[in-house]
Image: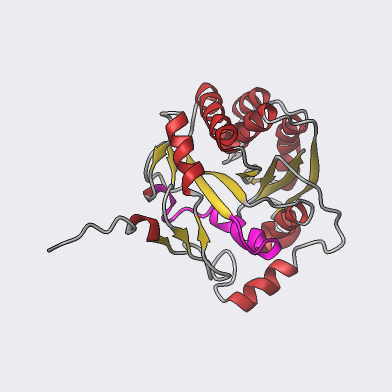
Amino acid sequence: MMFFDSDKQSREKRQPAVAGRFYPAQREALVRDVESHIERNAKKSPALGIVVPHAGFMYSGDVAGAVYSRIEIPDTVILIGPNHTGRGEAVAVMTEGVWSMPMGDIAIDRELANAICEETAIAKQDSSAHRFEHSLETQLPFLQYFKKEFKIVPICLMKLKVSTCKALSEGIVRAINRLGRPVLLVASSDMTHYESHDAARAKDHKAIACIKTRDPAGLWETVRSEKITMCGVNPVTVMLLCSERLGAKEAELVKYMTSGEVSGDMEKVVGYAGLIIH
């Protein structure tokens, strides 16, 4: 007689896609790498949302580390990132299983992930979009360094209209309020890609100005009209919309830099911005 294994999906393990490339694959080396990017004496405070980059730690680790050094991490983290691979649904929520990482496995918050899919038809249960995507994975070592136990809700977004971002944010907030638990909204994004340092900085600060004034529609439109190659504009837009509904009062720029400041190549850089929404 065959029995259906109802826990099969819940035991699904997502293996790291970029360990050994974007960050070290060995636990001890990864801890040392993360430690080289954090600010040990930074004062921590609660946050509703953050904007953090997702490049190799060598290039964007200082920006990510500066942000994570300053925030208190709750028991559930909603990770929202862009879909670079083109796989899966337009709004893909992984609702079951664990993410395996060099510093240990991280479980998905099944209750909240499923609640988001229930609250808005835009969000679809889909793990395929996450299999080879790096934009969320690169956040996990920093989260794990600062907090031993937490759960995640991974959400991967393709290009969306601003109206779709708004509808998705409303569903996410309904799910958060329904379950009544504190969450951190992590929006993963790099900024301008492959322009000169000066051009990237000028363009990126137009987008950053919109984030600092907590203007999601303005951000979305500025990125489009100024042709800013900010890959995570949709995740940041959704995060800002959610944060406003959850009571955001201020946004601060923690750090901005480009890859040229690490590599020395100032002609073809990628920009990285780290912001915190309180």
Q: Is residue 239 above or below residue 265?
A: above
Instruction: Please give left or right for residue 274 compared with residue 154 in the image.
Output: right
Determine if residue 12 is in view.
Answer: no
- Residue 215: image quadrant is top right
* Front-most of residues 140 and 11: 11
Q: Is residue 105 above or below residue 165?
A: below
Q: Is residue 142 in the magenta section?
A: yes
Q: Residue at x 73, y 61 (%)?
A: 262
Percent x, y for residue 160?
49, 30
Position of residue 20 relative to residue 155, above or below, is below
Is residue 169 in view from this perspective?
Answer: yes
x, y percent for residue 65 = 73, 58
Magenta region, residue range: 129-150
Left or right of 43 in this view: 140: left
| Location of residue 205 in the rendering, given as x and y in whole percent from the top left corner | 76, 36
Q: Is residue 204 left or right of residue 30?
A: right
Q: Quadrant of the N terminus?
A: bottom left
Report the residue at 67% width, 72% height from top: 31
- Magenta-drawn stretch contains 94: no
The image quadrant where one finds the C terminus is top right
Q: Which residue is located at x 61 percent, y 61 percent?
A: 149
Nearer to us in this view, 1 or 177 = 1
152 or 177, nearer to the observer: 177
